[in-house]
Every structure is written in C-alpha cells, then in structure tokens.
Amino acid sequence: MSSEEKDPLYEVSFDTLEDPEDPLALSDLRKWLIVGLISCGSICITSISSIWSLVSPSIMEEYHISQEVSTLGISFYIWGMGTGGMFLSPISEFHGRKIVYVSGLFLVFAFGLVPAFSHNIGSILFSRAIAGFFSSSFMSVAGGTFSDLFKKTERTANFKRDQQKELNKALLMYSVSPFFGAGLGPIIAGAVVQYLPYRWAFYIMSIWSGVMTLLVIVFVPETYEPVLLKKKAARLRKSTGDDRYFAPIEKIKQSLVRSIFLSSKRPILLILKDYMTMALCFYSGFVLAVIYLFFVSFPYTFRTVYHFNSLGQGLAFIGLILGLCLTAIISPPFIKIWYDHLMAKNNGVHVTEFRLLPLIIGAFLTPIGLFILAWTSYPHVHWIAPIIGSFVFGAGTSLVFSGIFAYTVEAYRKYTASAMATNSFVRSMMSGAFPLFGLQMYKALGIQWATTILAVFSCFLIPIPFIFYKYGAMLRAKSPYTWSD
C-alpha cells in the first residue's frame, strides 16, 4: 500500500500510558537506571580519550617514537569523536536509539582491544581513531533518549511531577559525565603506570566498555517513539493479518544515506555562513582544547616542578574534575536567581540572550584560573595552589559550556541537532590539535609563560558574551538558521 493510500484510521499511536510499549510508561526506577547507565557510558568513553596521557611515556619508550607521534593517540580519538556524530547519529532516526548505543559501545570495546594486545604502533593509532569515531555514536543520541523518557505530552498531563524538571535533572546528570570521565582517565592511568605494566590501563578500559555494552543490552530498552510505533504496527499486521496498520515513520521515503548526507551538510554550512555559530564554537573549542592540552602539560608540570610520581600526576587532575562537576551541580540555582531578576526588570518577558548568563561568569573565571595556575607553579609554592587554579578554570569551563549550550539550543531551535553537531566538530578539531604542540610550547616558553599566553588569549574572548548579549537579537534576525519564535 502506498503512502497516499494509507487509511489514517489505521495509523498506530500511543494514546495512554497504559500501553506497555510506550517508553513514558516505564517506572521511575527504570528511567533513572537508564539515565545512570548512559551517563556511565559517557564517563567510560571520555576516560578512554584521556587515559593515553599518562601511558604515553611508556609507549614512547617501547616503540621508540617521538612525543608528537605518541600524542596522536589522544588527537586521533578526539578527532574521531568530533566527526563521527555527524554521520552516525541519523541512524537513530531510522533504526532507534538502542542499536546506536550497542553498536557504538561494542565497536569501542573491539577496537579498544588493539592497544591492549597489539605490538604495532600504526595499528594502535588507527584503532584509536576508529574507536573515537564510533564512540560519538553513543554520545550523539543521549539527549534524545532523555527527551523520550521525560517528554511532556498529553499522555503525561496528569503526572504529579514536572516532566521538564525531570528532563533537566537527567541532562544535568549527563552533562557532568564527559568532564568527569576526561579527568578520571589520567587518574586511572597514573595508578596503573605506578604499580602495573602500562597495558593494564587498556585492559581496564576494555573490560569497562565491554561490561557497559552488556548492561546497555540488558537494561536499556528502545525509547524512540517512531521506531517503537513501527514495531507495534508490524506486530498488529502480523497478529491480525490486516496490512492496513502502519506507523508514521513508514510514510517517510527518505533514505538513510540521504539523511546522513543532509545531517552532515548543514553543520558545515553553519560554520561557513553563520558567524554566531562560528564564534560560539570557537569559544567552546578553545576552552575544551585547553583541558586536553592539560593532559600533556599537567604531567610535565607536576613532574618537573613538584617531582610527583605517575600516581601523583594523575591525582593532580582532581582540582579540575571538582571544578567542572561541582559547578555544574551547584550553579543552576544561583543562575536562576539572576535570570529571575532580569525577567522581572524586563516585565516578565523572556529574551533568548538571558541564556548567556553562565557564559558571562565563566568568561572571567577561565582566565583567572589560568593566571593562578601559571604563577603558582613554582617549587617554593605549595602544590595545592596550581590545583586550586585548575579548580577555578574548571568552574569557568563548566559555566562556559552551560551558557553556550543553553543559548545554542534556544537560538537555533529548529536546527539544534545541526548546531550542536557543528559545535562538537569544531571543539573536537581544536581539542585534538592543542596537545600536539602543547608540550613543546611549555618546554620552550616555560610553564609560567606558556600558561600565561593561554590566559591572555582567554581574556580576549571575554567581550564575546557581552556582544551577543547586547546584539544577539539583531544577529539572530539576520541568520537563516536561528529560530526566534
């Protein structure tokens, strides 16, 4: 039966929460188990990206390669994460969320075995790139899953809890996980290198990603409503023998290949034609790139200045982790107070640029943290001082990302997925590049001046949120991609 001949009376749907196939009908415990597992998966994937930092010296020694070649183990993984999402996330629109999670995690596990067992540096670096590429398929659909579970519809109108608040809690929990994972990787690697052969770091990550794959298979169901309705329609056709039952997604004739092409085309156009996107992407890219530069500069700093062993070098990342994670958890109520104050001054009228409030604060904290880190890294100054600097920088980074993401989601409402994919691509390209020259910069200029250059450059970025706050509405009106309704 063609799409024109389909009878609307036979279009399947979820009308009430009594339908067991409806993802909104899952129990609260099951929903938060899913959120927890997806967040743990994000921690695992980002830990794999950064675990290379403290095993790099052992790899250089075993394979007789330079620092630059070894650092490609970080860069290739990050570049893979940045490009993979644009090409792999459309699969979820045709085949659902679960197959993306399972296939992505399994391939991360499979290619993660190569560094654990291979004795060829070429195959190891290649496997890092492929693992990073497929790890992006896991991270690119997490927000969609949370929206599936806590969607506000007519079916949830009588719920006692606010679906939007539940969704915000889930997104907050998930937003912390990539930062936590990126900081956790060096700690794991430092402990391993201190007490075990370095390959144990890769054994641990392979076991972790393998276990996560099994947990997702067992405990994370399909949550994408169009795909679930497609399965329901197929079941009804089979059980009743009536071929007139159909799901809305079955009326879409666009191929998967065409969908992937379109989803990768729009982010590129956003970079080239939308200056707001370019500026916001560059800002978030620079801040994240500094964090990934820390994966080569922190071990060097705390080894040469404070003579920390491998475990101590890994633990030096705790300040950064706490700054990133605690700020993400604690800051929302305070930002809301400021937001409510601006709303009251504006006669209760919301303005999209109010979403930039966290970015305005973060724009000052990031250079402050870098200046503290730069000018306390001396042997006569206690080691806690640069770690405090990294805490302040981490707090600023968390606020920068919070403001940029919130503003992007609202300003580019119609093209949110493309705008976020663009942001992911740009920041991953920059994050992969910084570690390649970071250690040389620190050795040539010295720890203090190298970090100062980063701090001064971050000062030049301070005007960006203020410019967008004042002129954002005008800039959005000129953009073909923003959505101001």
Image (spheres, grey):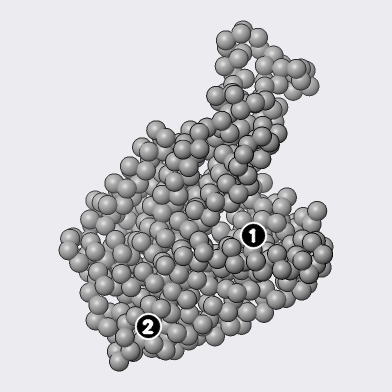
**Residue at the spot 28% in from the left edge and 62% down from the top edge:** 189
The three-letter amino acid code for the residue at tag 2 is Ala
The three-letter amino acid code for the residue at tag 1 is Ala
Q: Is residue 479 visible?
A: no
Q: Residues within 10 Å of mark 1 (few under 14, many from 20)?
A: some
Residue extending farthest to the bottom is 380
**Residue at the spot 44% in from the left edge and 46% down from the top edge:** 36
| Quarter of the view holding residue 141 | top right
Mark 2 or 1 closer to N-term?
2
Left or right placement of residue 288 versus residue 229 in this view: left
Left or right placement of residue 352 versus residue 446 in this view: right
Residue 349 in the image: x percent, y percent?
80, 61
| Quarter of the view holding residue 273 | bottom right
Q: Secondary structure at mark 2?
A: helix
Residue extending farthest to the front is 160
Q: Is 228 in front, or is 385?
A: 385
**Residue at the spot 71% in from the left edge and 17% down from the top edge:** 10
Is the residue under label 1 in contact with that under label 2 (CB below 8 Å)? no
Left or right placement of residue 317 versus residue 12 in this view: left
Above or below, comparing residue 362 to residue 211 in the picture: below
Residue 440 in the image: x percent, y percent?
39, 81
Q: Secondary structure at mark 1?
A: helix
**Residue at the spot 63% in from the left edge and 74% down from the top edge:** 360
Residue labelled with disc 2? 385
Q: Quadrant of the N terminus?
A: top right
Q: Residues within 10 Å of mark 2 (few under 14, many from 20)?
A: some
Residue 192 in the image: x percent, y percent?
23, 61
Residue labelled with disc 1? 406
Residue 114 in the image: x percent, y percent?
30, 50
Q: Is 366 in front, or is 156?
A: 156
Above or below, comparing residue 176 to residue 309 in the picture: above
